C-alpha cells in the first residue's frame, strides 16, 4: 500500500456538502490506495469548548456521518483521539522541545486570542504540538491540509526534525501536504457569499442529514437577483452559486437547460430552485438513510470504535517505544 496518511476530524456539528466535496470524498478514495489514519479530534475540541455539553455524543455523530459517507473501518483506521493515550504522551515530549516564541507567532493562536480573550488557555498555545503528535505518532508521510492548516503542518515538520536532530536519530519522517488539486470542489453557501460552512449559520449549508423539508426551506430562501437583463450576461456571484450547486447534484442536461434559459433572459429562479430542491433531496437521500441506520446500531458503532482503537494503539505503541528509547527511558 502507498503512503501513510493521517488526518483529524473536529467533532463539531453535522457534515455538509462542502465537507463532502472537499476532503471527505477524497478520503474515501485514499483509503483504497494508502494506509490511512482518520481520528476524531475530541482533545482538540476542548481548546475552544472546555466544557462541552455532550462530547461523546458529538464525536459519535461525526463517526456515524463519516461512515455513512463511505469511510470503511476495514480499510482505514478510524478512531477517537481520546482513545489513544500515546498521543498525549508524545504531546508532552514535543512540548519539552517547543519554544514559547514560535508558538505565540502561530496565526491561528493569534486569531483565537482575539476571538476568545477570556479563554486563552495553554491548549490553544500548544495546539501545534498536539497536532504534530497526532500526525507523527503514526509516522505519517502525507497529511491532507487546507490553506489554514499549512502553518501547522510546517511546524509539525519543524518539531519532527528537531527531535531527530536533538537525539541524533531518524525516528520521524517529515510529513508533506497531500494536495488533492483539481479533485477538490469548492461548494458555495446559500447566502450568496463565500463557501459553505457551519460558521456562517444553519441556513447557509446543506447538511448530509437534512430532512427534505429543511432542504426545501434553505434553497427556496437562497439569495437571487431580479434576473438577467442582457443575453449571455455574466452571472452574479449568488446566481453562479446556485448553478454550482446544481452541477454537483443534477444531470448535465438539467444544468444546460437552466443555463440556456438564463442566457436567453427567460429564467425563472423559482423553477430553478424547485428543480434544485428535488435533485438535492435525491442526492442526500442515501446519506440520510445510512445515517439513520448507523445511528440505531450501537453494537456496530462500538465494534468500529474498539477496532479503530486497537489498530491505532498498535501503530502508536511502536512509535512511542522507539521515542522513549532514544530519549533514554527504559522499561
Image (tube, rainbow, N blue to C red):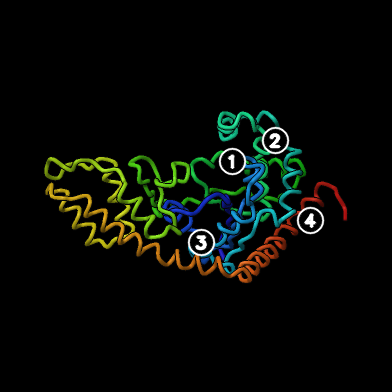
Residues marked 1 and 2 touching at CB (< 8 Å): no
Near mark 1 (Cα within 10 A), the count class, few <14, some 14-19 or many ≥20, is some
In whole angstroms, how far apart are the C-alphas of marks 2 and 4?
Answer: 27 Å
Q: Nearer the viewer, residue 204 or 250?
A: 204
**Disc 1 and disc 3 in contact, CB within 8 angstroms:** no
Q: Secondary structure at mark 2?
A: helix
Q: Say whether residue 295 is visible.
A: yes
| Residue closest to the eye, 307 or 96 | 307
Point out the tag, 2 or 3, that comes first from the N-terminus. Answer: 3
Residue 94: percent from left, percent from top: 72, 42
Check disc 1 and report its element: helix, strand or loop: helix
> Disc 1 marks which residue?
152
> How far, Cα to Cα, is label 1 from label 2?
16 Å
Q: CA distance from mark 3 to mark 4?
A: 28 Å
Mark 1 or mark 3, earlier in chain: 3
Q: Nearer the viewer, mark 2 or mark 3?
A: 2
Q: Is residue 120 left or right of residue 88?
A: left
Question: Does residue 157 lie above or below 101 as drawn?
Answer: below
Distance of mark 4 from mark 1, alpha carbons?
Answer: 25 Å
Mark 3 lies on a secondary structure that is helix
Q: In the rendering, at what x and y percent does residue 79 appear? A: 64, 60
Q: Which residue is mark 3?
A: 30
Q: Earlier in the sequence, mark 3 or mark 4?
A: 3
First reached walking from the N terminus: tag 4 or tag 1: 1
Amino acid at each position: 500500500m502507498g503512503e501513510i496518511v493521517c488526518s483529524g476530524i473536529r467533532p463539531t456539528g453535522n457534515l455538509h456538502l462542502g465537507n463532502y466535496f472537499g476532503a471527505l470524498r477524497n478520503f474515501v478514495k485514499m483509503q483504497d490506495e494508502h494506509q490511512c489514519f482518520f481520528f476524531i479530534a475530541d482533545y482538540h475540541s476542548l481548546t475552544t469548548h472546555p466544557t462541552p455539553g455532550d462530547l461523546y455524543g458529538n464525536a459519535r455523530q461525526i463517526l456515524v456521518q463519516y461512515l455513512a459517507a463511505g469511510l470503511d473501518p476495514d480499510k482505514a483506521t478510524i478512531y477517537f483521539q481520546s482513545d489513544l493515550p500515546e498521543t498525549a504522551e508524545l504531546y508532552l515530549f514535543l512540548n519539552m522541545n517547543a519554544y514559547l516564541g514560535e508558538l505565540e507567532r502561530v496565526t491561528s493562536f493569534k486569531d483565537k486570542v482575539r476571538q476568545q480573550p477570556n479563554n486563552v488557555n495553554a491548549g490553544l498555545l500548544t495546539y501545534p504540538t498536539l497536532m504534530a503528535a497526532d500526525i507523527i505518532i503514526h509516522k505519517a508521510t502525507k497529511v491532507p491540509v487546507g490553506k489554514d492548516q499549512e502553518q501547522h503542518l510546517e511546524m509539525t515538520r519543524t518539531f519532527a526534525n528537531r527531535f531527530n536532530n536533538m537525539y541524533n536519530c531518524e525516528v520521524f519522517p517529515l510529513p508533506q501536504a497531500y494536495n488533492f488539486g483539481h479533485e477538490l470542489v469548492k461548494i458555495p453557501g446559500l447566502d450568496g457569499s463565500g463557501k459553505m460552512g457551519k460558521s456562517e449559520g444553519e441556513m447557509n449549508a446543506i447538511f448530509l442529514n437534512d430532512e427534505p423539508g429543511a432542504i426545501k426551506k434553505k434553497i427556496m430562501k437562497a439569495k437571487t437577483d431580479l434576473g438577467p437583463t442582457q443575453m449571455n450576461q455574466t452571472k452574479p456571484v449568488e446566481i453562479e452559486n446556485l448553478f454550482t450547486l446544481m452541477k454537483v447534484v443534477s444531470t448535465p442536461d438539467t444544468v444546460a437547460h437552466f443555463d440556456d434559459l438564463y442566457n436567453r433572459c427567460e429564467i425563472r429562479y423559482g423553477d430553478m430552485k424547485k428543480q434544485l430542491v428535488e435533485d438535492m433531496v435525491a442526492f442526500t437521500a442515501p446519506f440520510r438513510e445510512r445515517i439513520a441506520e448507523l445511528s440505531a446500531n450501537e453494537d456496530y458503532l462500538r465494534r468500529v470504535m474498539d477496532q479503530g482503537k486497537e489498530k491505532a494503539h498498535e501503530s502508536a505503541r511502536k512509535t512511542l517505544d522507539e521515542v522513549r528509547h532514544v530519549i533514554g527511558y527504559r522499561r
